[in-house]
Amino acid sequence: MSSMLLLPCLWWAWMTVDMVAVDAAITFPSAAPGSSLAGLSVYAATVTTFLGPQPGDPNSPRSGRVVLLTDDMCKPIAMQAAGDIILATAEATLGACSLETKYLTLYATGAAGVIAPVLDVVPSLNMYSNDGTKGAQTRGLPMLFLRIGPSRDFYDVLIAGAPGQNATITPDVNVWEATFASWYYQLFIRILPSLVMVASGVTAAAYLALHLRITHDEYKSVVPNVSRTSRRLASFVRKSLGLPHAVLTIEVLTSTLPGVVLAIGGYYSTPNLPFPILEYFLSQLSGWSFASSLLSASVWIRQLSRIFDSNGLLTRILRGDYPVVFGLLIVVPIVIDTAFSVLQAIFYMDPLVAKILSATIFVLQLTVGLHVLFGVLRYYWTVRNVQGQTSGSEHGASMDPILQRLGRCALGMSLSMLMICTGTAMMAASSRFMYTPSGWTTCFSLNFIGRALDSAFRVAMFRPRAIKPQGRSWVSTVVAPKSAKAGSQQQQQQQQ
């Protein structure tokens, strides 16, 4: 339902962004008539708002002879380009260092301006990126630093024909500025996801504390006062811990932190955070998020053994029948996601790692999400049939409230996972669309809202509800069987 309400707003946002007009910022006035550059004009925006002259600054246009740069911008450059316009190759822009470092390296050549291409994008997404100095060393320098986003064919024409020509470059208005400031970007990518994630993390902490309090109360009720020791308490608590506690612990950290970073940084829409911090949380800790979803799915599938059993391979894996495989499904996404985050934070932006992470998370999210969804639907179908035959039975009355609540949360979790997959699939279908203001807003709205709702449903799944039957201690009603074997034994006991 949430995605159905979201799509009309995103469509309106898309159409609004695409109607923004821009002017050409790079021209080649000396190109011979009939040449590939004759009459050609290219839109270009400043790489960031903290590097050199910006739109509206006086005397910002620059003219000069175009020279080609193939060297890594992050390393000292021997080129002398006093008064020239440097046209860098796409490979030269990929060095692992900050944009400020690249700017100062190029500034040392004496160039009047630099054109840095990135293929098939609308420049410049990183307009607010900074190393924490916010232009203290670079904003007042006179060298223009522009970004263009040509197609591969157009890029080849520029690299082949532009060197040696005279060019005039002017910083154009960045179309991303209007997108980042728009209500729909701030609402769907920043405000709603961050609020839900932070609220989920705080709620998870409260639920975890209540679970532990219930465990402590149970300890006091079963262990005589004279026999209580710290060691015995620790042992009692350790034996009481299960998957719900693991999920809540993960959510306390991996939901709260990305939510706070998203709220402050605005996902590229503000200069509030240094670039390394922004990039570390680029994936919203998706590996940890999937691990939490996997553990939650395991709890749900084990609880389903109270209704029906399945010998399907995926069910047995998620139930924990194969501990090594189950452990790898948890560890591998976390390792890949952490490696991606660290590489991004140190400016080593390897597209291969990003593709591996996206493909891994997509396949796992889609597989587990669909399996949980089918399990929920099967549960509702089974319960409906059973209730029709055994309406009002004591067993059904005692079982339904817990499983029905878990079923609702599992349903929401599975739909949230599929929402994330939808956004990821749109990114993979067309990178050119993704790196437009409309595509970026659409894809990441689906991704981030899905990520936030995923956390919310996982936390809600393990809401403790303390009860105190006569003569018994306070206990939590949401405790999953700790193993598939335990779940199977429960089912056999119920059948007997």
Image (cartoon, rainbow, N blue to C red):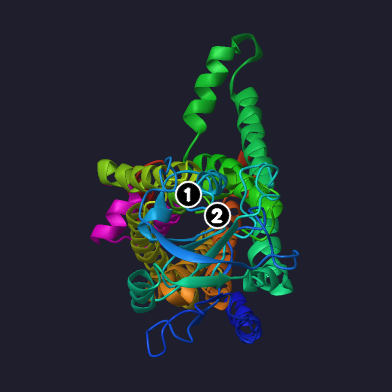
Image position of 262 with respect to 97: above or below: below
Residue 143 pos. (x, y %): 60, 55
Boundaries of the magenta span: 294-321
Residue 61 pos. (x, y %): 64, 68
The amino acid at mark 2 is Arg
The amino acid at mark 1 is Ser
Q: Which residue is mark 1?
A: 292
Secondary structure beneath label 1: helix
Mark 1, residues whose alpha carbon is within 10 Å: few (<14), some, or many (≥20)? Answer: many
User: On the rendered image, what quadrant is the N terminus found in?
Assistant: bottom right
Going 32% across and 60% down the picture, which residue do you hit? 309
Would you identify the image quadrant in which residue 300 lies? bottom left
Q: Which residue is mark 2?
A: 458
Residues under labels 1 and 2: Cα distance?
A: 8 Å
Image position of 84 with respect to 251: above or below: below
Residue in front for this viewpoint, 316 or 160: 160
Residue 401 pos. (x, y %): 59, 60
Residue in front for this viewpoint, 484 or 108: 108
Point out which mark residue 12 bears.
none
Among all residues in the image, which is located at the extreme bottom?
34
Residue 207 shows up from this direction:
yes
* Most common secondary structure along the magenta stretch: helix
